[in-house]
Image: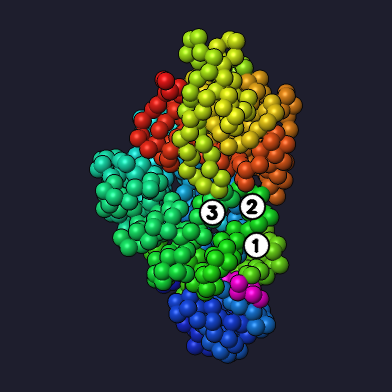
Amino acid sequence: MTSITPKTWAESAPRLIDVATGRTPADMVVRNGRWVNVHTREVLSGYDIAIAAGRFAAIAQDLSYAIGPDTTVIDAGGRYMVPGLCDGHMHVESGMVTVTEFARAVVPHGTTSMFIDPHEIANVLGLPGVRLMHDEALSLPVNVFVQMPACVPSAPGLENAGATIGPAEVAEAMSWPGIVGLGEMMNFPGVAMGDGRMLGEIAHTMAAGKTVGGHYASPDLGKPFLGYVAGGPSDDHEGTRLIDCVTRARLGMRPMLRLGSAWYDVATQIKAITEMGLDPRSFILCTDDSHSGTLVHDGHMNRVVRHAIAQGCPPVVALQMATINTASHFGLEREIGSITPGRRADLILTSDLAALPIETVIARGVVIAEGGALTAEIPPYPYPASAKSTVRLGRSLAPADFDIAAPAGAAEVTARVIGVIENQAPTRALTARVSVDGNGHVIGNGRAADGSDVCQIALVERHRGTGGVVNGLVSGFGYDKPCAVASTVAHDSHHMIVVGTSKADMAQAANRLAEVGGGIVVISQGRELALVELSIAGLMSEERAEIVAAKAATMVAAMESCGCRLNNAYMQHSLLALVVIPELRISDLGLVDVTRLEKVDLFIQN
């Protein structure tokens, strides 16, 4: 298809006025629909919508006068006319596909605007990687706005990333046409302590008149939180409890309630609206992280809106949280988020406001999807060679690289263990009694001496070829046979995470990912059960979303065949190195107690 680059409202205004007043025909008229007005929270029956120059020109009960010989006429047949859905915070890379492929996957689900934070590619390729995704976003026939990554690395001193971003890079990016703000400010301790680098990034963003994204991943709502809010972040998607969103809203932040592939944080927090009666215009819905299988099979923002409605939220309120609230937050209320004159002509036709079947999707005045299928041609976006071949181990790894040496003479040891929490981003800091073999190495074969579920985890450095391997223990995956799962998607520094019960399989899995340039692989007893190749920065595939989703399904099945029963276990796997979310994580520098923001020993002395 030919993408319509949206002209400014000023450039379009003469044409819009002429269509609205009947002096010239519209490009498209949608007739006889139920207008879902998210400004007034009304559903108004029997309305027409006139579209010209990719924008809404007029909405009235009879716009037959705007129909000319070349006007496309769509009969809504009494269906609901809903603004195109907006995702207020998300990471394209979590879908394991490019921005183009992500758009192809979500447009049939009614998403026409996305606010993306490409800090995954930033941790691998730095500012040039952000520019690649920014330029790709501008080429698309839907709205993809970019937030400049704020924390690369996310926790200086506790990890090393493949690149570094600071105030100078933020200042440069603020001049780019598609940048709408600063991405999630994950270094919340830095902001609360007045760190000059973090405050410098925020200052450049505010000086540009743009939005500062938040990420306060701590349950402490006392002085550190108050300091963080005073530092400037204006939204936050890390709340998991009712008190989290209530406190944020009361202090002028926009709580972003997320439902991703593995994050289920809407149900507990939406009670602020459904039970406490707080003003819903302060709240936003988002996905944060969705893998390709969720996008292709379950949906995107339509899935989040349905879920909110299922929790008792009135349908139009849920839609406000996925349209106008998001647009207003980013200062784009005059561009997107509602079906009102002058806005970009993004809308959905649906026959049921609660079930929300996405029957027709119009973006910038062009029908782009029908009946759940993309009808527009969106060609692949070419990534340069500089964005590939980014997995550098420096050497071939051997099983001995995954040995965990116990204190001399010990038959059993007490060890710190990362505890996975199903459907949530935080982990638990657990301890377990683990056995030691005859060679003095900890046994992490899936079951600890005390009967708990414990296997090995390793962080393999992959940016500079140092050959470094940091070993630890993890609980919650349930692997009960010799196996290994390795991934170069390892938020946020994106080294390689290997989890397994067999050191031979762990070495084979790591070497396999180095061979293919990144991705996810499942190995069991020397046999490759699944492979998802992610050649772009070790994060994204060059293949179509449907193909990636099929490979990801094979990966999930392979993990299950090894004993894993977690919902979306891969998403949990990929976050085990995220050293800005409590409680216990692993980095290329060692085991990290995120609550205390310090490195800790694997073994606890009795």
Q: Which residue is mark 3?
A: 264
Q: Which residue does the image show at 57% across and 63% down from the upper left?
A: 307
The secondary element bearing badge 1 is classed as: helix
Q: Kindly indicate whether the residue at mark 3 contacts the one at mark 2 (C-beta within 8 angstroms).
A: no
The secondary element bearing badge 2 is classed as: helix
Comparing labels 1 and 3, the label whose residue is closer to the camera = 3
Q: Which residue does the image show at 47% across and 63% down from the upper left?
A: 270
Gap between marks 1 and 2 measured at Cα? 13 Å
Q: Kindly indicate whether the residue at mark 3 contacts the one at mark 1 (C-beta within 8 angstroms).
A: no
Would you say residue 350 sits in the magenta stretch?
yes
Q: Which residue is mark 1?
A: 108
Label 2 neighbour load within 10 Å: few <14, some 14-19, many 20+? many
User: How was this image coloured?
Assistant: rainbow
Give the residue type that dot 3 points to: Tyr
Q: Is residue 497 left or right of residue 230?
A: right
Where 197 falls versus 355 (above or below)? above
Comparing labels 1 and 2, the label whose residue is closer to the camera = 2
User: Magenta residues, as a range?
Assistant: 345-354
Give the residue type that dot 2 points to: Thr
Give the residue type that dot 1 points to: Pro
Magenta region, main secondary structure: loop
**Which of disc 3 and disc 2 is earlier in sequence?**
3
Where residue 6 appears, as percent x and y from the top left, is 50, 65
Gap between marks 1 and 3 measured at Cα? 23 Å
Give the number of the disc on residue 294: 2
Q: Which residue does the image show at 40% across and 36% down from the upper left?
A: 594
